[in-house]
Amino acid sequence: MQEPVIKTEKLTKRFGDFVAANELSFEVYPGEIFGFLGANGAGKTTAMRMLCGLSVPSSGKAMVAGFDVSGDAEKIKKNVGYMSQKFSLYEDLTVMENIRFYAGIYGLSDKQIKEESEKLIAILGLENEVKKLVIDLPLGWRQKLAFSVALVHQPKIVFLDEPTGGVDPVTRRQFWDLIYIAADKGITVFVTTHYMDEAEYCDRVSIMVDGRIEALDSPRNLKQQFSAKSMDDVFYKLARGAKRNAE
Amino acid sequence: MNAVSLDKITKTYNKGKTVAVNEMSFSVDKSELFGLIGPDGAGKTSIFRVLTTLLLPDGGSAIVDGCDVVKGYKEIRARIGYMPGKFSLYQDLTIEENLNFFATLFNTTVKDNYDLIKEIYIQIEPFKTRRAGKLSGGMKQKLALCCALIHKPVVLFLDEPTTGVDAVSRKEFWDMLKRLKEQGITILVSTPYMDEATLCDRIALIQTGKILSIDTPADIVKAYSGKLYEVKSDTIHKLPADLRNYEDTLSCFAFGEYMHITFKNDKTDNSASLLNYLTEKGHSGLELKQIEPTIEDCFIKLLKQ
């Protein structure tokens, strides 16, 4: 068995009396596509912020890419990529400026930046768009560029927070092709989504309800366990009982 | 008379360089639940802003509840409810204060129209002294709907009310819309979630400012030409590439654990030869059967035409 790239033990975050993430224990392996699902307010964002080294756990432990989230947060940031639907690229910078900006922040040398940006632009077929402002690119291209930029420093793990929200059905599927390619290269993909068909594309899926992980397995096993036809059914059966969401 | 009708509405930005809505025409019947279905950038929000008189169109005309959107904007504003895509209530007012504020703006009281919002409001009433900025996503959504309804609008415009909302809350929200429709309110709702399309009476599938198709969900599905199959295999990661390389494949897209596939030549039965091909490629646990297309299948097909 491979060493896990994410390993949490009773990872907990409290805000006053409120337990946002409650004793989360799970492992994610290299090259795995791990779906991190939950209703609004279930605690997904809180958990993800801790794993990215942006928020210090109240108790429990988490190792990410070989580093402790409590002590080595800065090293974690260097070894993970992050992309969200809401914010990922600077719209008023050009394609090339965005790549250079992110690569620079992650500490790549000028030579590396030049090599990586040329590679990236060739793979995405954006040769004619390098001087265009990101705001002038179609949304689908922006998403693909954002994903590639999140990988520019060759992280071990990439966190994707609702990467496909609002994207058209064809582009949404092309985006998953990129996810598969990254996973085949051994990059771990940690992804949240509200599209339940996308949950089926993950190797394993966890479902959070009211701060706890209530289920964690492959989509196939989860469907069997909950006698459900689809992941949509599984999610509905679990999340319907959520108390926080009703609040 | 139609509740809403658009005649060649065009809306551009950047001095005409960006065409958000391109000569769009459609109409919505009274008490209809009508869905604008399309991805980001399709023009949904621009259409809503023209119809709610917040933006002037660059061309064409539109009528809402008998009034022209340009000349009759004052009348329209009094008669419609609008829930924008971005949460736009006062974050530092409480639930109760927001609701009273919007009722007062429209010269009415919460008491007068309480029946209309009762069912939704009782779900957030226990927290009525909480500030709107401190509410969860689901509660914000319910409060915004109450505020849009409190003056008993004739037409309700809901711009992506379920975006970013989890699957359970989305189902609840659509149940609420169905009950509002039963009370005679015309509802225009937009969504990027194709699975929500079947919950509307009629839908317009839109992309880059144009209508791809407009009809009842059932008739859009019926209009899908050609046969559609679903395929499943135990080695799901390998399946897309192998299907794309199959000589008779016209299109194939992932739909959850299945791939949906169409053939170039669908006059004859292709199942046996495809199954042979996939078995040779090392697939096991194969399933293949003809299926009814979903709205998402129809949208994908229309995009390619």
Image: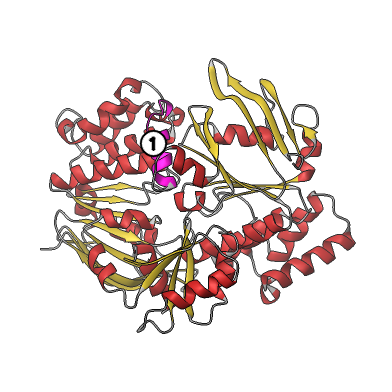
Could one spot residue B84 in this view of the protein? yes
In the figure, residue B241 lies in which quadrant?
Answer: bottom right
Residue B244 horizontal/vertical position (percent): 55, 74
Would residue A195 be seen by someone viewing this image from the given angle? no
Magenta span includes A235: yes
Residue B231, given in percent of the width and then of the height, sits at 45, 65
Q: Does B221 appear above or below A159? A: below
Q: How is the image coloured?
A: secondary structure
Determine which residue is flagged by label 1: A237
Local packing at callout 1 (Cα closer than 10 Å; few below 14, some 14-19, many 20+) is some
Q: Which residue is at a point 45% across and 49% down the rendered structure image?
A: A196
Q: Quadrant of the N terminus of chain B?
A: bottom left
> Is label 1 in a helix, a strand or a loop?
helix
Q: Amino acid at mark 1?
A: Lys
The magenta region covers: A231-244
Q: Compare residues B303 and B77 and report the one nearer the observer.
A: B303
Does residue B34 appear left or right of residue B169 in this picture?
A: left
- Give the chain letter at badge 1: A
The residue lying toward the viewer, choosing from B29 and A154, is A154
Residue shown at the point (43%, 29%) measured from the top left: B135
